[in-house]
Amino acid sequence: MAIRFMGQQNNGAEENIFWVTMADLLLGLAIIFITLFVLAMTGFSQQNIQQQQVQMEVSQKIGEELQKADIDVDVDKMSGDLKISDVELFELNSYVLSPKGKKLLDKLAPIYINSIFADKELSNQIQHIIIQGHTDSQTFAGITSKDEQFLRNMDLSLKRANAVAEYIFKTNYDKKYAEQFRKIVVVEGKSFNEPVLNEQGKEDYAKSRRVELKLKVKDWNVSTALGLKK
């Protein structure tokens, strides 16, 4: 009887140790989950603030330098995005840069690139410089298919963005930034997917035809917050 009783005690002790161990494990997992959740919630809020701050600082620098050079382009004060009308850049109904467009880029591009890369701390936060072409939704003569209209405009918007990108590399920006610029520049064509609307909510055809220079700030994530990724 004594031996049998001692055996039951040992079994009970082992069961207690098992449940204590499981409880500790579950508690540990819960703490990790809560920590990651808090980091995600606070971190992504912090990310938005930091991204906005970086873009505003770059935007302010670009805006001030463009103003000094008497260059009149649309600069978004919050994002740093530049919008340049097609009539300022291209020959009529073409993706070929006009003499007027080349002259504008000769002045604008060095200011834009140098302003971004001169401040190393700010430039390290920039993931991409996006050169983006846009068209309006007016139809090409003789084309009735919406898909064909879209693709023709996609082709035109991409060629215009690429023409601007190619010429920017030829401008007199500080070439010590050339390698950095090559690594982060992206060229896109958006067709008529992102029209500019007027106060009545209708498409402004003239303003929709444009090339934009946009900044994409690096994303924050949990790995960054934990110091696992920079």
Image (cartoon, rainbow, N blue to C red):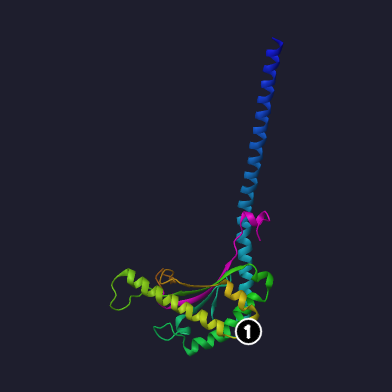
**Extreme-top residue of the structure:** 1
Residue 15, image quadrant: top right
The answer to whether residue 212 is magenta is yes
Query: Which residue in the protein does label 1 denote?
Result: 68
SS under mark 1:
helix
- Place of residue 212 in the rendered image (x, y in percent of width and height, measured from the top left): 50, 75
- Work out whether residue 159 can be spotted: yes
Which quarter of the figure is the C terminus placed in? bottom right
Q: Nearer the viewer, residue 41 or 95?
A: 95
Q: Which residues are magenta?
A: 204-230
Residue under the image location 66 percent in, 42 percent down: 31
Q: Name the residue type under label 1.
A: Lys
Residue under the image location 67 percent in, 32 percent down: 21
- Work out whether residue 207 can be spotted: no
- Place of residue 2 in the rendered image (x, y in percent of width and height, measured from the top left): 71, 11
Left or right, residue 10 beside residue 62: right
Residue under the image location 64 percent in, 71 percent down: 123
Which quarter of the figure is the N terminus placed in? top right
Residue 105, image quadrant: bottom right
Left or right, residue 6 beside residue 154: right
Residue 200, image quadrant: bottom left
The answer to whether residue 49 is magenta is no
Left or right, residue 68 beside residue 146: right
Above or below residue 141? Residue 202 is above
